Structures are given as structure tokens and as C-alpha cells.
Image (cartoon, rainbow, N blue to C red):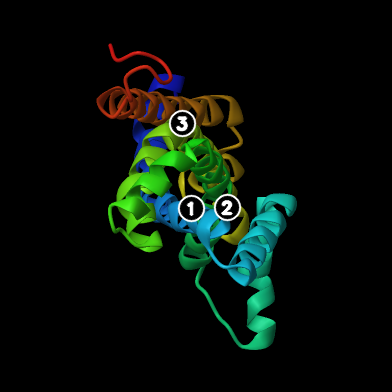
Amino acid sequence: MGEWQFLTDQVLPRLNQGVLISLALIVPAACIGFCFGLALGVARVFGPAWLRRIGDAFTAVIRGVPLIVQLMVLYFGLPNIGIYLDAFTAALAGFIMCTGAYQSEYVRGALLSIKQGQTRAAYALGLTRLQAVLWIVAPQATRRALPGCGNEIIYLIKYSSLAYLITCMELMGEASRLVSHTFRPTVIYLAAGLYYLVMVTAATWMLHRLEDHYAIPGFGRPKQ
């Protein structure tokens, strides 16, 4: 069988199945992870002392432990204490926690960059602390954190390939399974790499458009 026929008849159909699972992991993990990171970042800056300590500890643990170890604990470790997650759910939970912890750092930095005078002005207008954070500080910080958070989403696309190690057969899992059956790794892994390149390129383009749309005049790169 020629390389082209092998690619079109066997490789692409299997990789197409895998990329659907990858997208089913990446899209909700990116959306939920961003919201989680935003909430965690706000809690770490404006929350009470006990909540800040919990947020800092959670972030330190998640950032300090390799993602593959977290996935192994979620899938293989939790059943020892009576918690059973299927491979997809374990992978999704791991990605959400990981990307949320990293994004909270971008959000925290953006929140600290907002001048305190704006918060004082909000208090002078009669807003509560919660209202000032939700309506004055957080929207500005979110816009400033977009480049960093977008970069984390790019990383999420690439480290989603770890899901197959806990038997969630996404793009990389399908590629590896096909290699084990056909022993033709060059074509298969090059095709899988092209899929990841396309996803990263598309995400980069969309994130740049989003950054341009919400760009703050005089801060960061100018709108195109």
C-alpha cells in the first residue's frame, strides 16, 4: 500500500476520530479553566486571608506537580478512596485544574496592575468592595490578562496529548494505537503533528482577534 493511500484510507479517518475527542477536551477545559482562573485570581487578591491562603496553596500544588502525575492520581489514585472517574472526565478535570491555576497567575498580576485609586473612587461613589471588584477592577484585569491566558490555552492544546496515557483516546492516543498496529510511525506522527499545528494556528489567530477587539488604548500592543 502506498503512503498516500495509507494516509487517506487508514490514518486520516482514525485521526479525525481522535481530534474530535481532543476538541471535546480542549474547548470546555479552556472555557471553564478561564472562568475558574479568573475567580481564583480574584480570590487570591481580594479574598479574606484564609481564602487567599487556600488559593495560593492550591496554585502552588497544581503548578508544582507535573500534569501527568495529576492525571494519574485522578484516574488511578482516586478509586482507592472510592471515587471513580472515567478517562475522559479525569482528563477534563485535570486540564481544568491545571489551566485554571496557571491562568489565575495571569489574572492576579493583571489585578495588581490596576491602580488603587480606581477602587477608592468606586468606594466614594457608594459601591461595595464586591461591586468595585466585579464592575471596575475585574473587567479591566481580564482584558489585560488576555495575552497571558491566551498563551496558556495554546499550551492546553499541546498538553491535551497527555490524555491518552490514562486511556482517553484522543488525537495522540489514536495515532499511537495506529502505530502499534501498522508499525509506520513516520507518516502517522507527522500527520498528528500537522493536526496539532492547525489547531494551534487557528487558536492563535482567534486569540489575536480577541485581544485586538478588547485592547485597551495605550496599554499593550495597539489594535490593528
Residue lying farthest to the front in this orientation: 124
Does residue 102 show up? yes
Q: Residue placed at 44% from the left, 52% from the top?
A: 38
- Residue 196 has which mark? 3
Residue lying farthest to the bottom in this orientation: 82
- Residue 101 has which mark? 2
Q: Provide the residue designation for mark 1.
A: 37
Residue 51 in the image: state x and y as whole percent: 59, 68
Does residue 178 show up? no
| Amino acid identity at mark 3 | Tyr
Q: Residue placed at 51% from the left, 63% from the top?
A: 93
- Count of numbered labels shown in the rendering: 3
Q: Secondary structure at mark 2?
A: helix
| Amino acid identity at mark 1 | Gly
- Residue 57 has which mark? none
Q: What is the spatial separation of the Cα atoms under label 3 and label 1, in whole angstroms?
A: 24 Å
Quick one: label 2, few (<14), some, or many (20+) residues within 10 Å?
many
Give residue 80's quadrant in the image. bottom right
- Of the numbered discs 3 and 1, the one sitting upstream in the chain is 1
Residue 206 to residue 64: above or below: above
Residue 14 in the image: state x and y as whole percent: 40, 43
Quick one: label 1, few (<14), some, or many (20+) residues within 10 Å?
many
Front disc: 3 or 2: 2
Q: Going by the image, does 37 lie left or right of 98?
A: left
| Amino acid identity at mark 2 | Ala
